[in-house]
Amino acid sequence: MDLNLKKEQLLKSLQGKLPSETILSHQEDCSHYGGDWTRMTGDPLLVFLPKTTEQVSEILKSCQKIKIPVIPSGGRTGLSGGAVVTSNEVVLNLSKMNQISPVDTLGRTVRVQAGAVNEDVHEHCAKEGLLWPIDLASKGTCEIGGNLATNAGGVRVIRYGMARKWVSGLQIVTMNGDIIELNRGLEKNNTGYDLIQLMVGSEGTLAVITEATLKLVRLPQKEKVLFFSLPSLQAISSFFESARKGPFEILAFEFFSQKCLSAVENKLKRKSKLQKGAQFYVLMEIELGIGVEAEQKLDDWLNSILEKEFVQDGLMAQSSEEKKEVWSLREGITESIALTNEVRKYDTSVAVNKTVEFVTEAEKLFQSMNLLAELYLFGHFGDGSPHLNVVRKDSADHKTFVQDCERFEAELYPLIKKWGGSASSEHGVGLLKKSWVEFSRTPQELSLFKAIKSAFDPQGLLNPGKIFSM
Ligand code: 2HG
Ligand code: ZN
């Protein structure tokens, strides 16, 4: 059926069921919702901005009846193209569903709508001394629905794990319009399959998440932010080994190369406060016990560390301003690199104790290929989750850059497989990592994926073509 005809039919079928402000139909309004942070974009047939779960249900029901595919989306900060429109699908954007209920301090949970912004949830819970532990560089824009649909990671995975650990209830709407409550916020419920865990990481291909009950922890009582320069990856590893045994709990252990730091410094027009630079940097955030004794133990540990040859220089942020300053050096990397030139991202993961060997081999591979591109290394060292960003050199045109990246990834993914790693540690598969899923998943797993997809969405209308093709 002709697209315009389908559009008319859909609007007719929803007449009287949705307030007019929840529907965008002009191309200029719609195109804003066609893409995400990958810069890939498409033209949506229509965009829906529902305010209630019932409206989501009506939209999905009508789309199923008329056989119109739907792309669910939220803050659209994804880096794998999971929320990108590819063939004039309808966009169902949940950003207007952003209510946050009062915190349940006894149960240590909070119920939120899918469009609640991650940072707003943090601020809301902090007033009760509580924390939803998923903290990522895009926190000011990304939304809880997307955090759960992609099983977001971020900078505190080393301490708390991924998003899937921090949810005890989900409200979902399936493609046929059914509204289903999963697990009702129970801490314990051993009655068969865990459908919440199936939803988390399904990237909007099985159902649309409309509400979530999030599990909370106490806010860390005494956080310290430390920043070090180190001469090599091996040095980071030795340092990490010592930090693991240190008199504190590690909340974040992030690394980045000198190239990344220079890009951020150029963007921020400010230098890091370390006296001595080096090939690599580590940002470590820790939680310290209460009392003078804990401070003394930290000082002793720091003095012993600064004597070791693997640390070039180090500092501890002395105020909340300084903490923010140090964090901005790490959190600003993605945006700063994007300003330098065209970028391809490789969101890799290997076992934590294999990180150095893997990154060293990947770096060697990159150098041996003499590409007209530069490699920026950074990421979540403490989780075995290094981000490899390949950036075009000015001397290469777009076409050469794409060919170079294709040559590189044809060897990088087998390397990831060799190390038993994953083609996507935390950004999801979306469109960009689709052809590499088989390097991390077996044919048996992929055929189960397809069977599960068919059970939820037999006509294949929900976020079609994402993660895998049917
Ligand atoms: C981060 O760790 C994000 O800052 C983005 O996952 C990583 O830009 C990237 O490759
Ligand atoms: Zn990351």
Image: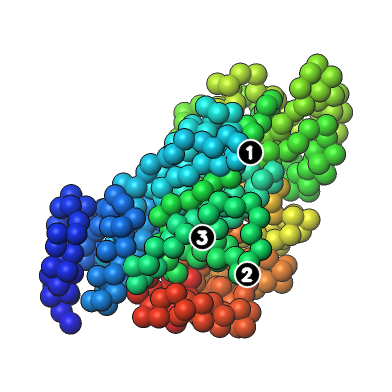
Cα separation between marks 3 and 2: 12 Å
Residue drawn at x 27%, y 64% as measured from the top left: 59
Q: Position of residue 228 (x, y in %)?
A: 70, 33
Q: Secondary structure at mark 2?
A: loop
Q: Is mark 3 within 8 Å of ligand 1?
A: no
Marks 1 and 2 close (CB-CB < 8 Å): no
Q: Of the residues under marks 1 and 2, which one precedes in the sequence?
A: 2
What is the basis of the colouring in this image?
rainbow
Q: Quadrant of the N terminus?
A: bottom left
From the viewer's perspective, is 268 left or right of 5? right
Does the image show residue 64? Answer: yes
Q: Of the residues under marks 3 and 1, which one precedes in the sequence?
A: 3
From the viewer's perspective, is 126 left or right of 367? left
Image quadrant where residue 438 sits: bottom right
Q: Of the residues under marks 3 and 2, which one precedes in the sequence?
A: 3
Cα separation between marks 1 and 2: 27 Å
From the viewer's perspective, is 380 left or right of 210? right
Which mark, residue 1? none
Name the amino acid type tagged 1: Val
Which mark, residue 217? 1
Cα separation between marks 3 and 1: 21 Å
Q: Which residue is mark 2?
A: 192
Q: Which residue is mark 3?
A: 182
**Crowd rating for badge 3 (residues with CA inside 10 Å; few <14, some 14–19, many 20+):** some
